[in-house]
Structures are given as structure tokens and as C-alpha cells.
Image: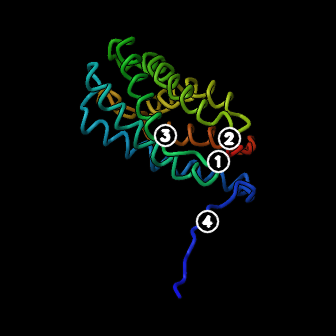
Amino acid sequence: MSATVIAARKPLTMPRMSGVKLVFSWIGLALLAFPLAGYAGWGVGGHVDGVMPALIGGAITGAGIGFVQWMFLRRDLDVGPVWILGTGLALAAGLGIGSAVVDYEVSTGQLAIMGAISGAPVGIVQGLLLRNRFSLWSVWMVAMPALFALGWVVSASIGVDVDNQFTVFGASGTIVFGLLTGLIMMAGERLQVAKA
């Protein structure tokens, strides 16, 4: 007679972590995801000084950020791995368009514009993926352009060497981004997904 082990997924009825723990966990994940994925995208794609570096760097950076976010969201909101692909494609498109619109300039104002344009497709894709899972999916969608812009403004304001034309803002901007998106995560509620 053989013993069979069945791996059971945690049901969505399992309580979410406390609000404070959720926010600080999300900030920690952001601090892991954004700098590491940003350096990977920048290292492979190069300085964001043209369309191809923006597309390549944006795709790698977005996929890296998406992967780390998915590791958290798959348990909390039952988000599938399409989150990784969607975030990668969205950031590639957003960074490709946003950096071209500002002519690859790195003044604080230009970075804010680029950030808003970069964050728009990310917000749309991620919001749609959260639509049936998270009560504040539309807030998430609308907030991303402003939060990406804010991340760039904060990073540029504290003296990050933005002349290197990175794919995403630095750790200081990530802390602000992580805090504000963590607060959205805390304020929202899970929605039960009907399974056929």
C-alpha cells in the first residue's frame, strides 16, 4: 500500500496578513524587485537612450518585478503567472514610448513624464489581472502612472545618478512606491473567483 500526498493550495478564505505586515512585506518585496530587476534590465539592455534598449531593458525589468510581485500575489490573491509576462510586456511598451516621448532626457520633469507613461500600461495590465480578485483593482490601475512618476521624482530628488538612464527608479523611489501600493493592497479586499 502506498501513501499519496496531495498538495493543497491555501484557500482564499484563509485570512490575509495584518494590514501593517502586508504593507511592510510589500515594501520589502518592492525593495527586492525594483533594484535587482532594474539592474538586470539595464545591464542587458543598456542605457535607455534608444527604442531597443528601452524595449529590452523594460521587458527584463518588468518581468523581474512581475516575478517578485507574483510570488506574493499568487498566495494572497491567487494571481497566475501571466502576471509576470503581462508586467514585462507592459513595462517594455511603456518605457519604449515614455522614453521616446521625452527624447531620452533625464531631467526630473522628463523622468516624471516618462514614469507616468511607463506606469500606464503596467497599471492597465495589472489592474485587469486583478479585476476579479481584488476590490481596488481600478484604483491600482489608475494609481500606477502617478506612482511610477513619483518614484522617478523621489529618486532624482535625492541625487540618484539618473544620467545613467536606468530602466526604473532607485531604492528611494521604490520605498515610496512600495508604501503607497502597499496601502492600496491593505485597503482592498479579496474577491472570490468562481471556478468552473
Crowd tier of the residue under label 4, counting other residues whose Cα lies within 10 Å: few below 14, some 14–19, many 20 or above: few
Left or right, 196 with reference to 68 = right
Structural distance between the alpha carbons of marks 3 and 1: 13 Å
Identify the mark at residue 77; answer none if there is no mark. 1
Task: Give the residue pinned by disc 2.
Answer: 133
Left or right, 151 with reference to 56 = right
* Viewport quadrant of the C terminus: top right
Percent coordinates x, y for residue 51 in the rendering? 28, 19
Percent coordinates x, y for residue 29 in the rendering? 52, 50
Secondary structure found at label 4:
loop
Secondary structure found at label 1:
loop
Structural distance between the alpha carbons of marks 1 and 4: 16 Å
Structural distance between the alpha carbons of marks 4 and 3: 21 Å
Check contact, mark 2 vs mark 4: CB within 8 A.
Answer: no
Seen from the viewer's position, the closer of residues 23 and 6 is: 6
Task: Give the residue pinned by disc 4.
Answer: 8
Identify the residue shown where x is 37% and y is 46%: 36
Crowd tier of the residue under label 3, counting other residues whose Cα lies within 10 Å: few below 14, some 14–19, many 20 or above: some
Check contact, mark 2 vs mark 1: CB within 8 A.
Answer: yes
Secondary structure found at label 2:
loop
Kind of residue sitting beneath label 2: Arg
Identify the residue shown where x is 61% and y is 31%: 127
Kind of residue sitting beneath label 1: Leu
Check contact, mark 2 vs mark 3: CB within 8 A.
Answer: no
Check contact, mark 4 vs mark 3: CB within 8 A.
Answer: no
Say which label, 3 or 1, has the lower sequence index. Answer: 1
Is 50 located above or below residue 66 in the figure? above
Identify the mark at residue 82; answer none if there is no mark. 3
Seen from the viewer's position, the closer of residues 37 and 171 is: 37
Left or right, 26 with reference to 107 = right
Structural distance between the alpha carbons of marks 2 and 3: 14 Å
Kind of residue sitting beneath label 3: Val
